[in-house]
C-alpha cells in the first residue's frame, strides 16, 4: 500500500525559512504530479505549489518568489522550500500525489496527514 509521509513543519518567526518533505512509501513505479496544499483555520484548502514528473511547476501567486517546489523521482519525494515566511502562511500543509502507479494497483490521488506550519513573532 502506498502512503505519503510528511515532515518538516514547525514554528518560525516572520522572515524565516522552513523546508517540508513528503515521501511516498510502498512499491511505486511512477507518480505523475506531486504537490503541496494548505488550509488555514476557517479557510478552504488551497494549492500552494505542484510539480510534474517532468519538472513542470505551478505556484500560487501568494508564494511566487518565496517558495520553491522540487522533487526527487528516484526517492518519490517532493520538497517545499519556504523562505521569507509571513504570518499569513500559517496553515496545515498537505502533500498530494496524483496518478500513482503502484506495483499492485493504481491510485488516482493520495494525501498526506498534514503538517502544521506556524509563523509568529
Image: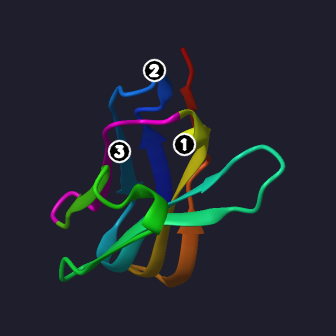
Asked whether residue 2 appears in the rendered view, the answer is no
Quarter of the image holding residue 85? top left
Q: Residues within 10 Å of mark 2 (few under 14, many from 20)?
A: some
The structure residue drawn at horizontal position 57% and vertical position 33%, both measured from the top left corner, is 87
Q: Is residue 103 above or below residue 4?
A: below
Q: How many marks?
A: 3
Q: Horizontal placement of 40 versus 55: left or right?
A: right
Q: Horizontal placement of 57 versus 35: left or right?
A: left
Query: Of tags 3 and 1, which is closer to the observer?
Result: 1
Query: Of tags 3 and 2, which is closer to the observer?
Result: 2
Q: Give the mark nearer the N terminus: 1 vs 2.
A: 2
Identify the magenta region.
Answer: 74-86
The structure residue drawn at horizontal position 45% and vertical position 67%, both measured from the top left corner, is 61
Pointer 3 with pointer 1, Cβ within 8 A: no
The structure residue drawn at horizontal position 54% and vertical position 27%, both measured from the top left corner, is 119
Q: Which residue was labeled with disc 2? A: 12
Asked whether residue 92 appears in the rendered view, the answer is yes
> Residue 89, which numbered label?
1
Quarter of the image holding residue 101? bottom left
Q: Which residue was labeled with disc 3? A: 21
Q: Residues within 10 Å of mark 1 (few under 14, many from 20)?
A: many
Residue 91 belongs to the span the image colors magenta: no
Q: Position of residue 110 (x, y in %)?
A: 56, 68
Residue situated in front as seen by the camera: 60 or 51: 60
Q: Horizontal placement of 76 versus 101: left or right?
A: left
Q: Secondary structure at mark 2?
A: strand
Amino acid at each position: 500500500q502506498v502512503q505519503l509521509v510528511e515532515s518538516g513543519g514547525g514554528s518560525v518567526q516572520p522572515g524565516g525559512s522552513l523546508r517540508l518533505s513528503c515521501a511516498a512509501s510502498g512499491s511505486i513505479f511512477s507518480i505523475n504530479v506531486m504537490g503541496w496544499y494548505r488550509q488555514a483555520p476557517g479557510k478552504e484548502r488551497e494549492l500552494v505549489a505542484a510539480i510534474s514528473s517532468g519538472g513542470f511547476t505551478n505556484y500560487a501567486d501568494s508564494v511566487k518568489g518565496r517558495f520553491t517546489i522540487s522533487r526527487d523521482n528516484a526517492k518519490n519525494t517532493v520538497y517545499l522550500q519556504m523562505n521569507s515566511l509571513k504570518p499569513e502562511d500559517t496553515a496545515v500543509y498537505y502533500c498530494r500525489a496524483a496518478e500513482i502507479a503502484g506495483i499492485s494497483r493504481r491510485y488516482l490521488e493520495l494525501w498526506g496527514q498534514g503538517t502544521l506550519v506556524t509563523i509568529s513573532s
